[in-house]
Amino acid sequence: MSEATANENKPVQTLEPGLKGVVADWASDQRSFKTASWGKAMMWIFLVSDTFVFGIFLLSYMTTRISTPVAWPDPSHVFGLHVFGVEVPLLLIAIMTFVLITSSGTMAMAVNFGYRRDKAKTTLMLLVTALFGATFVGMQIFEWTKLIQEGVRPWGNPFGAEQFGASFFMITGFHGTHVTIGVIFLLIVARKVWRGDFDNGRPGFFTARKGRYEVVEIMGLYWHFVDLVWVFIFAFFYLW
Amino acid sequence: MANIPHDATNTAPPAELGEMELYHPKSWWTKYVFSQDAKIIAIQYAVTALAIGFVALVLSWLIRLQLGFPNTFTFIDAERYYQFITMHGMIMVVYLLTALFLGGFGNYLIPLMVGARDMVFPYANMLSYWIYLLAVLVLVASFFVPGGPTGAGWTLYPPQAITSGTPGDEGGIILMLVSLILFIIGFTMGGLNYTVTVLQARTRGMTLMRMPLTVWGIFVATIMALLAFPALFVAAVMMLFDKLLGTSFFMPTLVEFGEQLSYGGGSPILFQHLFWFFGHPEVYIVALPAFGIVSDLISTHARRNIFGYRMMVWAIVIIGALSFVVWAHHMYVSGMHPYFGFWFATTTLIIAVPTAIKVYNWVLTLWRADIHFTTPMLFALGFIVTFVNGGLSGLFLGNVVVDVPLSDTMFVVAHFHMVMGIAPILVIYGAIYHWYPKVTGRMLSEALGKFHFWVTFVGAYLIFFPMHYVGLMGAPRRYFETSDIMVLPDSAITLNAFMSIAAFVVGFAQMVFIFNVVWSLKNGKEAGGNPWRATTLEWQTPKTPPEHGNWGKELPIVYRWAYDYSVPGAPEDFVPQNQPAAATQGAPS
């Protein structure tokens, strides 16, 4: 086998179905996940670790919310928007969530086009995904600005328990940072796709590893994870 | 049948992967400084960890000066004393033990032992070291900021960790938290490398159940670290916000000098839960690599296959899993619900089962074996004794009713120093004496090594064994001095002075070790490729020290497990893992 095939995920043996296959994989040599490349395995393990980070953030938020003696602000009131004189609870959040979930769809399309070696459409879909991501971050900035103008601070707010502002800015900020990093990497990957790095195996600037279309899929894993985490933040922070 | 070596075959499955793409350094800088070679990174990790560990050693002397001879050395005041114990604990647990076992031994041994050319992501691996170095530098910087390093105790319990009155509440605590966050980011980069390399980059024939136990220990410890460090990360971020932004995650309503602080409504107990959800697995993050390494040292130097290999592997995995459900046994006096104590005491005591299996298996490996009392073997044997000792006092502390009166006494200090201080450090020394010939091509001096071992081992007992008694008499930990507030019998005071003197002697013995390491670089005996006549792959490299890429042209192929020592019928008393079965069988099977 040549160097080009080193990291590609192609099954070498016939895979047994079901539990037998799992046992056979783990009992075998060389690789425990027969269809996963190194990059993909690395991303999955990283996401498990990152799940713990977000999980502990959310658990800490729930603990502080339960243990603080001051009443918690009513989220549907705090996060409501006045549109045409009507107060619509959670309107902005609904739009933000819709945008982010949509971006997961375009990301999936980018991965699909990537495996078809369709350079133009992959680039387009990556850029659309990045645009949705940037829109999400933009709306988050709007939301933060609105709350700050209403007097919400990490150390206190006019609506109730001061841990509300602290948890809100910390958790949405941490998630927003993830989205922002994702957008940056989406743009980098889009540039690489457009330049043809993944068609001609141009080595990476830092890693000197050959470019492969699988990078789009690994990028997708991260992006879907960030979207999934948002669903939990949405549920626990805005709906509770 | 009796002559067939365990698990050996003649064939290996075909290669699933092509050659690893390696980064080829173009200059001295990219070869030795910004190196992407796991072996160089390992040495960088090890040297940095040992250097900062030396700082912790000096701090421990200063602690012992005060404890042994209270009010004699006026430059140690109460504030400095708290800073010394805090930094000593933090450095030893995180920046020395974790970094050295995973970053040092993990980087060096994983690729070599599983037959890979390098870690799977050399660039991230390099970043991992440099971020670790940055974390260490930030930690060191805290000694030089106004107010000095934090003196909150290594557990950094709020609210006192960030309120005024605690030494280092201005800059020290901030730098401490930033340093921890950096450490975790750096470790994650390395940790992903270690796990993926073990899972996905083994050589032909290297199944998981043929891996040396060293790799198993480091592998499971890395997974645990990837799941446990997030808790510390979150806790550090939240405490940093409490300190810098005035949030109240961990801060209840407080009154200071008659004035109410702006904090209110936070939960200090939440921090304790987060800290120990990291902190308890951390004990095993340090212990599991030590277990693994000791198994290999014992097997090699007793010329005997490890007893119950599969049991050993599963014990490592079970200990790793159980250690995530025992954390609140550090919090029996925190006021949590008594039923919690019941649950956590039960899980804690259950851990004794797989741990005991490991100890019995080590003993059974040694039973009637051809034991060579080399320096690595001495350290490995010292570990078993020390670990059993520390484990037994753990049984006392794991039970709620016994723990409550012992809580925060010197008994606890003696317990954890035995079990996760002395024991893993003995393994580190044993491992350095064992693998130094592979890293440098030269042997360390055995005479100096044995001197180092006996002074360290006996000395450690002289320090920490009496400490149990002092603790049982009621001497509290973390007290600057006790003469004004409580009466300790004269014997306890004499014992304290005795322990201090022993600590200085042990400390100076470490200088002998440093001298040995430096001196042997040039003057050590030539080691050759496999001085211990060991079976594992790292001793079968074409060159010693192994060059970039480890294996020359062809990757090794593994035909057997890692413990074929003294196989009946084999021409030598060890059969390397990359030797096919046919070559060793005297008679046809």
Image: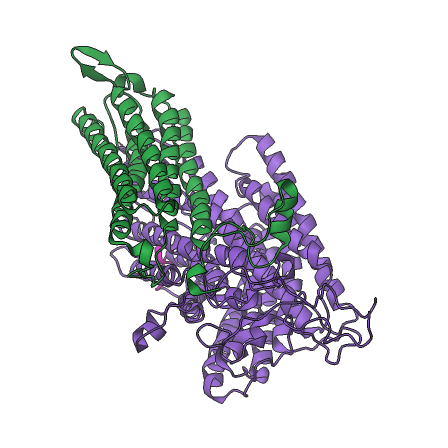
Chain colours: A green, B purple
Q: Position of residue B456 (x, y in %)?
A: 57, 72
**Range shown magenta:** B75-80
- The residue nearer to you, when weighing B297 against B85, is B297
Q: How many numbered discs sit on the rendered protein?
A: 0
Find out whether residue B20 is within the magenta segment: no
B214 with respect to B127 (left or right)? right
Image quarter in which the C terminus of chain B is found: bottom right
- The residue nearer to you, when weighing B80 against B237, is B237
- The residue nearer to you, when weighing A68 against B223, is B223
Q: Is residue B170 above or below residue A161?
A: below
Q: Position of residue A2 (x, y in %)?
A: 45, 65
Residue shown at 61% from the left, 51% from the top: A26
Residue shown at 67% from the left, 65% from the top: B561
Q: Is residue B458 above or below residue B329?
A: below
Image quarter in which the N terminus of chain B is found: bottom right
Quarter location, residue B59: bottom left
Q: Is residue B541 above or below residue B63?
A: below
A196 with respect to B510 (left or right)? left
B278 with respect to A139 (left or right)? right
Q: Position of residue A18 (x, y in %)?
A: 62, 40
Q: Is residue A74 visible?
A: no
Q: Residue furthest top?
A: A86
Quarter location, residue B446: bottom right
Q: Position of residue B531 (x, y in %)?
A: 61, 81
Q: Is residue B40 visible?
A: yes
